[in-house]
Amino acid sequence: MQTFAFDTAHLLAGGLVLVSFTLLYQDRMYGLINTFALHAFVLSLSVAWQAYTRHEPHLFVPAAIALVLKAIVIPLALRRMVVQLGIHRSIEIIGGVGPTMLAGIGLVALSMIVMLRATAAADPLAREDLAFALSVVLLGMLMMVTRRNAVSQVIGFMSLENGLILAAAGASGMPLVVEISVAFSVLIAFIVIGIFLFRIRERFDSVDVHALDQFRGEQI
Amino acid sequence: MLTVAALVGVAVLLGVGVFGVIASRMEEASRLVYGCSLVVCLALLAVAAAGLTAGGGTEINLPLGLPLVGAHFRIDPLSAFFLAVVDLGGAAASLYALGYGEHEATPWRVLPFFPAFLAGMNLTVLAADAFSFLLAWEFMSLSSWALVNTRHQDAENTRAGYIYLVMASFGTLSLLLAFGLLAGPTGGYAFQVIREATHPAWMPGLVLVLALVGAGSKAGLVPLHVWLPLAHPAAPSHVSALMSGVMTKVAVYGFIRIVFDLLGPPAWWWSILVLVLAGVTAVMGVLYALMQHDLKRLLAYHTVENIGIIFIGLGLSLAFRAHGMAAAAALALTAGLFHVFNHSLFKSLLFFGAGAVQTATGERDMEHLGGLIHRMPQTAFAFLVGCVAISALPPLNGFVSEWLTFQAILLSPQLPSWVLKFIVPVVGALLALSASLAAACFVKAFGVTFLGRARTPAAERASETDPWSRATMFGFAGLCFLAGILPGFVIDGIGPATQQLVGEPMPVQAGTPWLSIVPVAASRSSYNGLLVFVFIAVSALFAARFIHRFGSHALRRGPPWDCGFPDPSPATQYTASSFAQPIRRVFGPAAFRARERLDMPPPGDMRPARLSIELTDRAWHGIYAPVTHAVETTALKLNRFQFLTIRQYLSVVFVALVGLLVVVAIWQ
């Protein structure tokens, strides 16, 4: 049972990293939103599995929040927004897919090296979890950096938050309050960024953040 | 009990400051604020006197400030002495301002900050933990900065305030680091905890340097003095008196508190650093002062010189203490503290006089003054007493403290260290040089301002200043005189403080016959201010009687010597810069890269010839200008970061994070 629990947790966390990679090469808007829903679903599975195997029922709460909000509500809302705003359906990736994927692989390797060395004394489940979580965070940041479109930046940010939740769930003993606040912070970020998107659109008829930079009168 | 009384006084001062904010546009606000400050300062002076005689009060801990540390306050003999200096100066400035403050054009810029400044200085002296000390120190700096900016319409004053602010922050940063090192990783910020802690061997030296930079930048040690001659004259005169006469002393207090009290036994090389800096400060300060023709700036540069003299005393005391010569250390420390007291007296007096001159004529430039002794005879007399005292002439107080410093220097051959044996006499020579140059400087300051004939109509129309100001000046002149002829009582008053710091006071002077002072042994040297005064008075009287007996009684007025030109214009008089010229020619090229430029028109050309003098502050060009330049260039380069796109900002964060992770990965 112990090894089965461990392997499954490993599988789910690894799956999250894999979905992060698939997020990186999505070049269509709907595909991106669907993949993000999958990302959140795998996260909720992973957290629920942790709750089940470690007998910490309070962890089911963040799992449920992740499932309902991030896998269902937010993707639907984003879809509506894309339709309503008539956002361009293709996404431009800066630097191309290949180099971005290579950079992502490098980041995962880096987080493995750092985390596995730094947490040599910790329990193996938490170690693996933390290493994967850091990879997800870094991949989320990479996505935010390599996209020019505001919607994909929002999704990058939320996948980064997913990584944080994974880390919070993996470190046992973290109080429920923290987990809930992490989950809610995502929602708040979503609302804030959503409003931000509408505002950009009102002003510039585009959600390309490039427009903002031009508005500030800068040399690009 | 004493500590509580002192803190109540500080609280009242802060309250007066708040009242100053509310009521500053009222008719009587100025009188009320200065009157209250005067009363509170006198009360605090009484507390300080009680503290000196009682040997200090208990420590109290207020539940303010840092959690778990609180705010500790305590009066011990050292802080009682400095409390006395602060509040004597504060009381005098308040009394003076009762009259002087009436002339203030914008009283609402001064009234709230004046009591706050006094409160800050008092609190700094009372603090008994590092946090409260730094807080009070910074409060003192900021309130005095606000006072420097009183006349902000003048761009030069704003610049002075800006430089002051930068230097004050830099000094506080150094002190912060010093206290951080002293408190160590356990964070024991209370002075009592710091005293009992043991420090690693490398640390005290570093703390000494930091304290020297931190307190020295506030006190005006060369090369950290650059802000002082700009900021002190920019404030209204009673505030200049406080800044020059009192705030620099609070800085000296900070240095003494850290180095003598908290840091434990000194290493032998500390004194060398202090002595060399102090000697350079004394000479450079007075040389700069000689070159000035702005009266208040001259006085401010003179503060730099006197800080050098005080630090010579402190450095000698460190040297003696490092070699276990407690009696000599007590003598040197007493000399330094005595000079602290003296300088607070005569520098405040001189700034009061300069303020009176400025109110009467609207001029600070000595080249536009002259002949004021006829118009303002009482101010002139008080100013003269201040000049004699600061020039260290007997029988006034300046002589006593410098004589004591020399006595300590004369004990230096007993030091075992060869380096010190060589350095101390050199410092003694520098001290002698600065004392004589100071005398020249004040002959110039008094002579050009008060003697001769008026150079401008403004000086011609001057009238004597108000009674409050005169009372203050005469009071301080009287104190200078008393401290000069009865120095034994002052030395005995300083006794508890030296006892606390070097473990031994100077021998008690009160019982010496004829009120002499005997620093080491009667066979070695002694000084009696009273006898010197009686001798001077009697011989002068006799000489006057004698001359009048054999000469004529008639008062004659003759034409002054006019260099062979029978021109009645007062502009032909000896000027301040012509007075300084010989000294400038000797020291100028080395000290300030002085350059004289003569613009002589060719024959036939009718335009006037011109002689212009260029002086550059070496410290400014050697140290500050490159630093400013570097900061400006870096800021310009970094300015690009202000205008990145959102994605670029994210990339910067991302790259920084990845870089740090790589560092962690490699480091392990």
Image (cartoon, coloured by chain):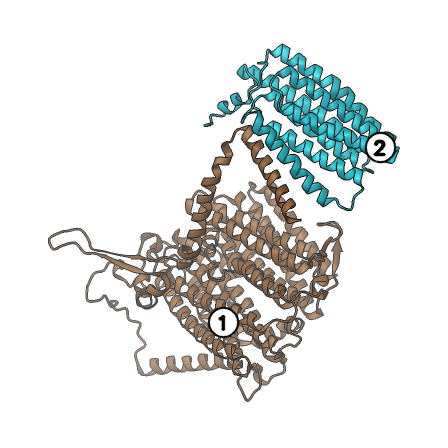
Chain colours: A cyan, B brown
Q: Which residue is mark 2?
A: A5
The disc placed on residue B407 is none
- Quarter occupied by the N terminus of chain B: bottom right
Q: Which residue is mark 1?
A: B398
Image point 35% across, 65% down: which residue? B590
Seen from the viewer's position, the closer of residues A48 and B100 is A48
Seen from the viewer's position, the closer of residues A14 and A168 is A14
Q: Is residue B359 visible?
A: no
| Vertical comparison of B536 with A70: above or below | below
Amino acid residing under circle 1: Gly
| Vertical comparison of A110 with B285: above or below | above
Image point 83% across, 31% down: which residue? A50
Badge 1 element: helix
Relative to B348, A73 lies left or right:
right
The quadrant holding residue B498 is bottom right
The quadrant holding residue A130 is top right
The quadrant holding residue B3 is bottom right
Instruction: Tell me the mark number nearer the camera, choosing from 2 and 1.
Output: 2
Residue furthest to the bottom: B523
Q: CA distance from mark 2 to mark 1?
A: 87 Å
Residue B19, percent across and down?
62, 44
Amino acid residing under circle 2: Ala
Q: Is residue B414 visible?
A: yes
Residue B464, percent across and down?
42, 57
Seen from the viewer's position, the closer of residues B191 and B291 is B191
